[in-house]
Amino acid sequence: MFTSPSTSELMNWTWADFEPRYQQLQKAELNSANLADWIGGWSNTRSCLLEMQNRLYSANTVNTADAEIEAKYKAYLDDIYPKAMAAEQTLKEKLLASGLEPAGFEIPLRNMRAEAELFRTENLPLLAQEQKLVMEHDKITGSQTVMWEGEERTLDQMIPVRMNPDRPVREKAWRMVAERVLADREALNKLWHEFFDLRMQIARNTGMECYRDYRWKNYMRFDYTPADCRSFHQAIEAVVVPAASRIYARRKERLGVDSLRPWDLDVDPFSRQPLRPYQDTPAFIAKTAAIFHKVDPVLGEHFEVMRKEGLLDLESRKNKAHGGYCIDYPLVRLPFIFMNAVGLHDNVQTLLHEGGHAFHVFESRGLPYVQQCDVTMEIAEVASMAMELLAAPYLTADQGGFYTPAEAARARIEHLEGNILFWPYMAVVDAFQHWAYENPAQAVIPAECDAVWKDLTLRFMPGIDWSGLDDVLATGWHRKSHIYQVPFYYVEYGLAELGAVQIWRNALKDQAGAVASYRRALALGGTRPLPQLYEAAGARLAFDEKTLNEAVTLMETTILDLEKVQ
């Protein structure tokens, strides 16, 4: 029905370019004979819209100080986005009213019904404003730097210093970073209030008093409830917190310290220098590519496409947004990976993780319509977290990777221990957000937020000595961007980690078979309910102590085996 513009043409589009397409789709008679063509035209138009949005978003995070890109992105949010969302809603209503159900569209139709129930015209400018607040958050955090040894460094660039075996050095670095974030305490509190009020209004506009109910439906969470999340928190407290305490106890003993302080958490417990897996970005990319080829030749070729097409922005630098992500460009059906690499093993894990997201984009390219490629975040994170574990056997240099066998064992121990320690932290982040949106009057009072975050941290993460650091402990929620930018997006990581460990368990018996199941699940995109996607990957969506205990036992047993190699 429509031809696709080039990327350069698309980036200069205005609403005047999108509007005729939407009008043609709205006016067209819809019947079984032209259904496929009509949905194809809609898919192409929606792909153009999302391509423009995602490219502007990624360009803004690549350089948060680029005033031209910022203005262009804001113009998109002000002019194109609200009108396009209204037009998208009209098309959803048209398809739903027709009673027609295209093959493979059962889940997209289910999602459209939920979106139709949530849609309110008055929310469109509010949703655009929310994205502007996200940009403001990126600007605040992206400008956070410190002076270290006469050099201005980003907070990500300070991570290697915080891993220094010299305890006074890493303590100084840790405190310097903490104080820099505290300097933005007032600004971050103010921004949180703006986010919170805006989100509460968005929910009220849909007839919901609790924003969590809005977000649950917005995230298409049809397969689990807030009560399941609370059960998951309790299972973590029962199973994982004791395992994490064992890790902290070993660390304290090996470091030979009286108490484990926050600046003792990143350093190697044997006081070895941090692993330095690569010297420059080309080597980083080349070795990661070799690992992906070992996991699966097709996945390796996917990564080669990204390298050749310039779809990797990996190094940390000033005015680059924090964190890392993979985003898709739907029109060209290609992913883009963004991260802040500083030469550490954590960067290897991040690229393996984001590579899993990228493979999701590649593997689902066979689906005819972009609406079928929309996946919920739980299965999206299974794709990424499972890839970290599937790639683990190939970290050694003899496999094309980065390390000696002893170094690889050390890296894998750090990864597995980090995954165990993550679950309690995830519970803190998720429980904090449930509290906030259940208690809106208290959640806009910074002191109340600080107190709840402190209590949750001490409950789920015992064994760390925070004495004399009350302000840093209490404002830990300031350092978790998801709370600001993507509310309630965090439990997915915990659920996905449990799914990923099950896939890894399968790979220990049959690596090729586990990878084949993994790829089959990714190729389904968003065309199956979440439990079926987990099942296709060889796992089970779970919240219970038994499944979690099986996973933790496997991880702890593997750590003990790797200790012998290390």
Image (cartoon, helix red, strand yellow):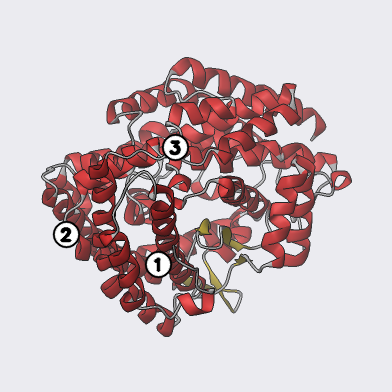
The three-letter code of the residue at mark 1 reads Asp
Can residue 546 be seen here? The reply is: yes
Residue 318 on image: x %, y %: 53, 75
Where does the C terminus fall, quadrant-wise? Answer: top right
Q: Which residue is mark 1?
A: 138
User: 154 or 502: which is nearer to us?
Assistant: 502
User: Residue at horizontal 43%, vertical 19%?
Assistant: 544
User: 332 or 398: which is nearer to us?
Assistant: 332
**Tag on residue 404?**
none
Reply above or below: 199 against 534: below
* Residue density around tag 2, few if under 14, some if 14–19, many if 20 or more, within 10 Å: some
Asked which secondary structure carries label 3, the reply is loop
First in sequence: mark 3 vs mark 2: 3
Q: Which image quadrant for residue 383? A: top right
Q: Viewer-nearest of labels 2 and 1?
A: 2
First in sequence: mark 3 vs mark 1: 3
Q: Which image quadrant for residue 117? A: top left
Side (left or right) of 275 relative to 28:
right
Asked which secondary structure carries label 2, the reply is helix
The three-letter code of the residue at mark 3 reads Ala
Residue 533 on image: x %, y %: 50, 31
Residue 351 on image: x %, y %: 64, 53
Where does the N terminus fall, quadrant-wise? Answer: bottom left
Alpha carbons under labels 3 and 1: distance apart:
41 Å
Alpha carbons under labels 2 and 1: distance apart:
27 Å
